[in-house]
Amino acid sequence: MRIIPVVIVFSCITLPRLSHAQVPNSEYADKVVAQYYSNAYPYYTDFYGGEGFNFPIPVNVHSIEGANTNWFVSLPTGSYIVMEFTNNKIIDYPGQNDIFITENGCNNELAEVFVSSDGKKFTRLGVVDDCNLNSLDLATIGYKDPVSFVKVVGMDLNGGSPGFDLVNIKGLPGSSIEVKEDAVADSLDNLSSIGFTALNNENPAGKEWVLQSEHLQNAQINLYDPSNQYVPLTYRSSELSKVVIDASGLKKGVYTLEIKIGSNVYKQKINIS
């Protein structure tokens, strides 16, 4: 089988930041994956918190998963919860804060926030409180990898339910991107789910795939044919804002477009019929 080279137009050093599809109803951290109770508040031997004005009472940490607004878990000094975004990731979107930590009440309660792409190595992002500062910008620490995990650590015993009262964690509009690694697409429009805006209007015959780029940096792009053989790529640096793939010689079948950003790998299947 003759393999036609794929031509990609972009800087060989970096891709500029590119627009992406925002994720309706998917911006919240969905799953508590780790927790630690420090016993800093000796009246409880495990996690406590409340439901509305009913506090402090024993609570299940999983009650704050997803778009919860009813329950909160209090984090006394040294206690922490790690939450995972399972159907989306949080990126550094230019000119705004990216992660919002919802707290219950206003009693000068503080918490440290850490972020991670793999759930193993965490980087300190900053401190939030329960009154004025409840969102943080990944740009303040130069964090480039998409965030999948957020760790919130209580710093005090303030409030009626002592400690930082965590309600939910979410990515702000513009910073939350959906990832579908195994979706089969009949058109390039579905590539928006992994952070690309596909433009076919520049080539109505469909012989080129034009991928507009505005938010990915240091991205490596690979293409594999239906037999999982690597399709060589040819790079030019004449344009910086888009990726152009020559698909004119590709035969029918399901191809795999692979995008690597740091330690993260995203895959999109494209059905050529």
Image (cartoon, rainbow, N blue to C red):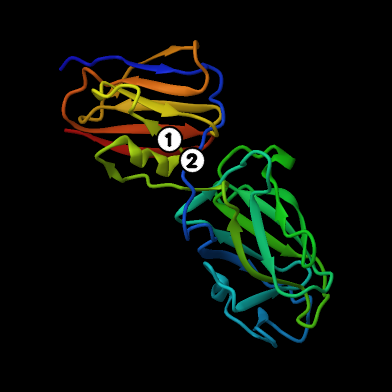
- Badge 1 crowding class, 10 Å Cα cut-off, few under 14, some 14 to 19, many 20 or more, is many
Q: Is residue 161 left or right of residue 237?
A: right
Q: Along the horizontal axis of the image, is 57 left or right of 127?
A: left
Check if mark 2's residue and mark 1's residue have beta carbons within 8 Å: yes
Where does residue 104 sit, x and y in percent of width and height? 71, 74
Q: Position of residue 194 (x, y in %)?
A: 43, 41
On screen, residue 150 above or below 52: above
Give the residue type at disc 2: His
Q: Is residue 164 left or right of residue 67?
A: right
Which residue is under mark 2?
Answer: 20
Q: x and y percent of residue 3 in the render?
A: 22, 16
- Of the pair 69 and 182, the residue shown nearer to us: 69
Element at badge 1? strand
Quadrant of the drawing holding the C terminus? top left
Q: Residue 212: which quarter of the image?
A: top left
Real-space Cα distance between discs 2 and 1? 6 Å
- Local packing at callout 2 (Cα closer than 10 Å; few below 14, some 14-19, many 20+) is many
Q: Earlier in the sequence, mark 2 or mark 1?
A: 2
Q: Residue at x 15, y 17 (%)?
A: 1
Q: Is residue 135 above or below residue 12?
A: below
Q: Which residue is mark 1?
A: 197
Q: Specify the quadrant of the image occupied by residue 77.
A: bottom right
Residue at 47% over, 61% down: 25
Residue at coordinates 58% horizontally, 50% vertically from top-left? 120
Instruction: Give, as a three-letter code, the residue at label 1.
Output: Thr
Task: State the residue at coordinates (70%, 46%).
Answer: 137
Question: Front-most of 151 and 109?
Answer: 109
Residue 161, image x and y in percent? Answer: 75, 81
